[in-house]
Amino acid sequence: MSRLALRMLLRDWRAGELRVLALALVVAVMSVTSVGFFADRVRHALAGEAHQLLGADLLIKADHPFDNAYHDEALARSLRIATAATFVSMARGAESAQLVGVKAVSAAYPLRGKLRVAQAPNAADAEVAVVPSPGTIWVDERVLPALDKRVGDDLELGDARLRIDGILTVEPDRGVSFFNIAPRVMMNEADVAATGLIQVGSRVNYAFYVAGEREAVQRYEAWAKPRLSRGEEMQSLDNARPEIRQSLDRAQQFLGLTALLAVVLAAVAIGLSTQRYTNRHLNSYAVMRCLGATQRRLMNLFAWEFLLLGVLSCALGCVLGYFAQGVLAASLGGLIGGGEALPSPTLVPALQGFATGLVLLLGFALPPLLQLKNVSALRVIRRDVGAPRQSALFAYGLGLIALSALLIWQAGDIKLGSYVVGGFVAAFGLFAAAGYLGLRALAAFGRHGSLAWRYGLASLRRRSRSNTIQILSLSLGLTAILLLSFTRNDLIDAWRNRTPVDAPNRFVLNIQPEQRQPVLDFFTQHGLQAPNVYPMVRGRLVAINDETVNADAYEDQRSRRLVEREFNLSYMDAIPGHNQVSAGRWFDVAALQAGALSVEEGIAERLGIKVGDRLMWSVGGEQFSAPVTNLRKLNWDSMQVNFFVITTPALLEKFPTSYITSFHLSGAHGALMNELTQTFPNLTVVDMSAILNQALSMMEQVVQAVQFVFLFALIAGVLVLYSALLATQDERVQEAAVMRALGASRAQVGLAQRAEFLALGLLAGLLASAGATAIGYVLAWKVFEFPYDLNAWVWLAGPALGLLCVGFNTWAGTRAALSQPPIVALREA
Amino acid sequence: MVKTTGLAKIVPGVNGSDSLSILQDIELEILPGEAVAVVGASGSGKSTLLGLLAGLDTPSHGSVQLDGIELYKLDEDGRAALRAQLLGFVFQSFQLLPPLTALENVMLPLELANDEYAEAKARAMLERVGLGERLKHYPKYLSGGEQQRVALARAFVVHPKLLLADEPTGNLDAATGASIIDLLFELNAEAGTTLVLVTHDETLARRCGRQIRLASGRVVNGSAQ
């Protein structure tokens, strides 16, 4: 049976009957598996090497130095330990300075996994079992060109001069580089004091690494867990790197759903092309029945044929998907620390790809195929005995349910999944309705003009069902592409333009009280206006209205992180110029005497703080409380120094304070910053424009990956277009033959067909432009909250792309209609 | 070989009008090796009779026996199996499968019967009908006469006991039609097949041993035997 099915498959393939169907399957499976393979590699990297990613078996992180209890207990239990302190600072060369992420490590670091170091850029790296010896550092490759240094040169870090001893290529527990914008400088912890970089107000992350016998580590974990204080967090093998897991889960979810757009469109293409296959095989089926094949035998034969086709297409889709994931890994790999270092994927995504392909085949190819079962053998004598029609909704019901299940499964939760399914249904409904109405309008418009135009545009209405499907699929694919190519840039430009040209582009942190005046003098000495300098004290929110703040009480991650971390508090008696009071009153004399708080309205809403509430703070081991007398509205885009919480001066003045400032520095004064950091080595200067550009380039990488996945959707959209064309091709050929028999010229018939396709391409393109613009508006309005200007180009690009996509169809359709003499088509009818 | 008793086909009228009687009280007996023509004007019920004899349709009344087997006591698959065993077909519109070459079209009934020598037998048969040079051609590249030769080869390749031919020259010009009919009778004689030939061509009908004339669904001349 299977051999005959294979022969039938080869014959049908040769006749071109199954190519669109196979292609649609390949595209769908490729789309799903490319994302699947990539996600699998990342997950594998996280799960398989969790202890390497942790750099230990157990890791405790804190925003303050650890007390000795952790250390002593670990040693008492014969566990190995290591420590690290991470902070941001400026590294200086002779002419330039560079913001770097410094990691000062103890000799035993890392306890699990290995560091790798190269001796020159692009040279082979090697594992090392040591850390930089005192007086030396290892740096990220990109530090060297930024400071015009080579391995062996000296580099200034704070008050210290350290020799670059190698290029750090692998660091096991490096955080997501998405957030680690500054390149790494690794040093020995013995040198920290000499740099003088860790001072009051410095934001330093401390890490305490533990490794040893599994049970001993578990017992230590049980001992340490209840002792964790605020700002301390424990990571073990089970919950290693939650931030990576979370952001990758989300990225995978998004890419997965994007991939499913191609699957949805492929489903339409598969349904259409199988319907055509069925229509063309009605006679063959009847003849084979005549030749004595039983119904069961024939259905088995067709089922085997399609199954073989499905398995081969899915296999090809998986192989191509495997290669395509390489593109994703190259785009996104940098964000998770070196795409090439990812382990090979497992076979699981291939199985998922196969499952998706089979769902498509069973859900969308089987129903039209089953219609063959009802074909009467009598058709060989009487052509009018056709296949009984089933209601499309009923026939494809199972497929639609399966597809919805696939979407919900990919979305990972029922609520989001239902939104996505609902979104798809709404988008399909909206585009279909708009397409249908557009067709009617064009057809009405087409009552004027030459015969060929009239005829071509009238065809729009006659074939409104298949034409609506074509418009729908093409416009969905094009919307995705326009959204990513035009709307994205518009949104980014609009966002950039919101920041004034002379907005501050440098932040200076870590200014110590005694440096405050000298720093201001530095500006005036160089002919610049002295910027506003704000005091900054770090404190933790302890209670709201006497109720202890508990991170677990907040549902969203961001609120939890906010209350767990220390706040940067400031104090002043006058409101900063770029702040506005939105509720209550700014500190009056009474408030200044009694002590009061001003809170940013967004964070107040997030944490449920109102005017009149009393907040208790812990600063430097002391606690104080004060009432909130006003809420402030901030313009975050102003790039000024902003504080979530400002207190009256009396409350905070007594605590250790550092100062922060921001100012605009034109390109001409660029070298000044180097001088500033040379004069005040402990200062950290953050170049916001560089960071912004880096963030944008990272976003670009993400967008590239998404765009790549959207490409599958576009290919699937074009396949739908082509399969819809094929579905009506026999009818078109027949019509063209009748027209020519009645005296129409080839030119007239060609023009009539082109008019129809032209209208289709234009309509689909316009709908896509409208879709992309509408989504752009909603994003600008709801998500980014800024005005969005209409882009005229998108309205040209949409129809142009639409015409380009139907161009092939126009050519193929007209060629088919005119390629044979009319008598052939008429005889075949 | 073929025997019908009280065979009738009535179809319900359109939009509630009276039902339409297409065939009534057909009593036929066709002996093995006989060549019988069924003649009549358009709409006389010829094709319906052929469909019933082949088990492609279901009668309203009466029965059909093929080689002693009650055709309509079998279910649809049973009738298909019987067709595979006994029948060959030739149609007015050839009914070749467009995606298959001439050779593959002739191989098809053998393949469906799991005949492992399908290709060799089909080749030999195509050579017999004079198309040995056109094995790899698709139907659309063959002339009408050549297509009907392929159809004859497909019908005879399984050595049927009964050949049913529905207006085999209806789509052909006179000269080609005549050569096809010559070939049909030659093959029929070689294989000793029973032939039932539906036609409205009186000349063609006269080449058969017996004619059964239908008018308005009834046999108006000829006899059951």
Image (cartoon, helix red, strand yellow):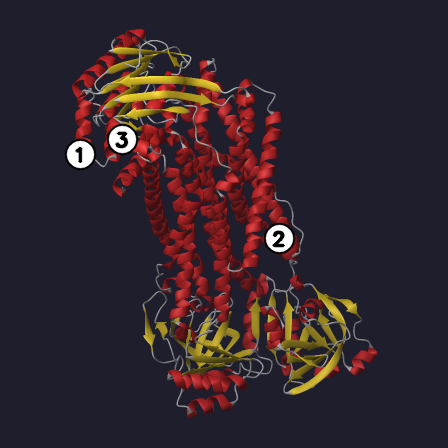
Which of label 1 and label 2 is nearer to you? 1
Q: Which mark is residue A558?
A: none
Question: Which structural element holds mark 2?
Answer: helix
Q: Is residue A95 visible?
A: no
Answer whether residue A622 is visible to the viewer in this image.
yes
Q: Are marks 1 and 2 in contact (CB under 8 Å)?
A: no
CA separation, marks 1 and 2?
68 Å
Which amino acid type corresponds to the residue marked 2 in the rendered image? Leu
**Label 1 to label 3: alpha-carbon separation:** 17 Å
Q: Looking at the image, which is closer to me, B176 or A746? A: B176
- Residue picked out by circle 3: B84
Q: Are marks 1 and 3 in contact (CB under 8 Å)?
A: no
Q: Amino acid at mark 1?
A: Tyr
Mark 3 neighbour class, 10 Å CA radius: few under 14, some 14 to 19, many 20 or more? many
Element type at mark 3? helix
Residue A477 coordinates in the image, percent (x, y)? 51, 43
Q: Are marks 1 and 3 on the same chain?
A: yes
Q: Is residue A380 left or right of residue B13?
A: left
